[in-house]
Amino acid sequence: MGEPIVNVDTDVVDVSEALTPTGWAMMDVDPTRELKKFEDAAELQRRLIPASIKCTKPQDWVEMGGKVYLQGTGVERIAGLWGLVFGEPTIEKLPLDGEDYAYVVSGFAASRRTGVFYKSIEGGRSSDDPFFDRFDEDKPNDFKSLAADVRREWHRVHRIRPDELDVRKAAVTNWQTRAASMLTGMRGLTKKDLEDAGLTGIKSVQFASGAKGGAAAPADLVDARTAFWNDIMKRTGGDIEAARRVLKEVTAFGDFAGYTNHESIKNPKVIEIATGKVKAHPTFGDAPEPGSKG
């Protein structure tokens, strides 16, 4: 469970999944008692998060886009503190382009410590994730300076396909990691949050560089598409599979199925239109203001 899998930080969870199906009447609620319970729960959360961080090690986290994300090994270390419970997951294999595929994992998860539970949380990984990249020979010294289509062809020819069991296990780990982060509230943390709890030495992962694959493109286009991709990566919490799906969705126009690589975008107008579609995305878009319509 040590793969560098990050969690989606902007998920909007259907509250119906976090509540019991039974209702309640306001007349049965004792405000004083409920306020005390609320304050106690808030204090428990305030204390448990720093205590949880102290139980982890630097390798249990990864920094990306100014935030830090808990990894699978970290979930193992904090599971006892929170009384984490994971139900038997449902695992589905989905075909992608060519020979690639994805495993989507969903299942029940809960915390005995806080009483919070979710009927179903989803995670997954795909076989084309760069995490699984292995090649049958070293890349050419001038690889980064090659045209994007040449690099993609070299990648296609020389990439060793990952073991399917490894992809499946990584998908399960991703589900557990996302579930743990949602149950504990350990989402959206920063490097400073960890340092305040006494944990330093976190590994950083950089987003796509504008120079990569962009030598033939004007500097302003390189900057625009890099910023566009970084925004998608931040919204999806660094989950490359989810980011690629969003990229393809928001760049689909008419009969065009959409881009799977931001470096292939040649028209700034595409980025402008797609940026608006990202902000309106049903899962990773900007949340509407309270009381707003639509």
Image (cartoon, grey):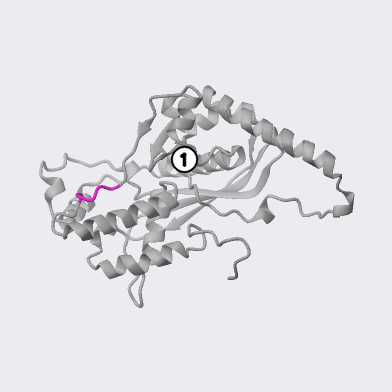
Q: Nearer the viewer, residue 246 or 26?
A: 26
Residue 96 in view, yes or no: no
Residue 257 in view, yes or no: yes
Q: Nearer the viewer, residue 58 or 193?
A: 193
Position above or below: 191 against 288: above
Q: Quadrant of the C terminus?
A: bottom right
> Looking at the picture, how far across and down is residue 157, in whole percent?
20, 51
Position above or below: 137 against 27: above
Position of 291 with respect to 2 (left or right) is right
Residue bearing mark 1: 169
User: Which residue lies most toward the bottom here?
Assistant: 254
Q: Image point 60% across, 67% down: which residue?
A: 292
> Looking at the picture, how far across and down is residue 145, in whole percent?
12, 49
Position above or below: 253 against 263: below
User: Which region shows up in magenta?
Assistant: 208-212
Q: Image point 31% across, 41% down: which residue?
A: 206
Name the quadrant containing residue 252.
bottom left
User: Callout 1 environment at 10 Å: few (<14), some (14 to 19), or many (20+)?
Assistant: some
Position of 137 with respect to 205 (left or right) is left
Q: Nearer the viewer, residue 37 or 106?
A: 37
> Looking at the picture, how far across and down is residue 231, in whole percent?
38, 53
Numbered label tally: 1
Position of 14 with respect to 276 (left or right) is right
Q: Image point 52% across, 41% down: which residue?
A: 187
Dominant secondary structure of the residues highlighted in magenta in the image: loop
> Looking at the picture, how far across and down is residue 64, in whole percent?
38, 40
Q: Mark 1 belongs to which amino acid?
A: Lys
Name the quadrant containing residue 263.
bottom left
Say whether residue 128 is magenta. Answer: no
**SS of the residue at dot 1?**
helix
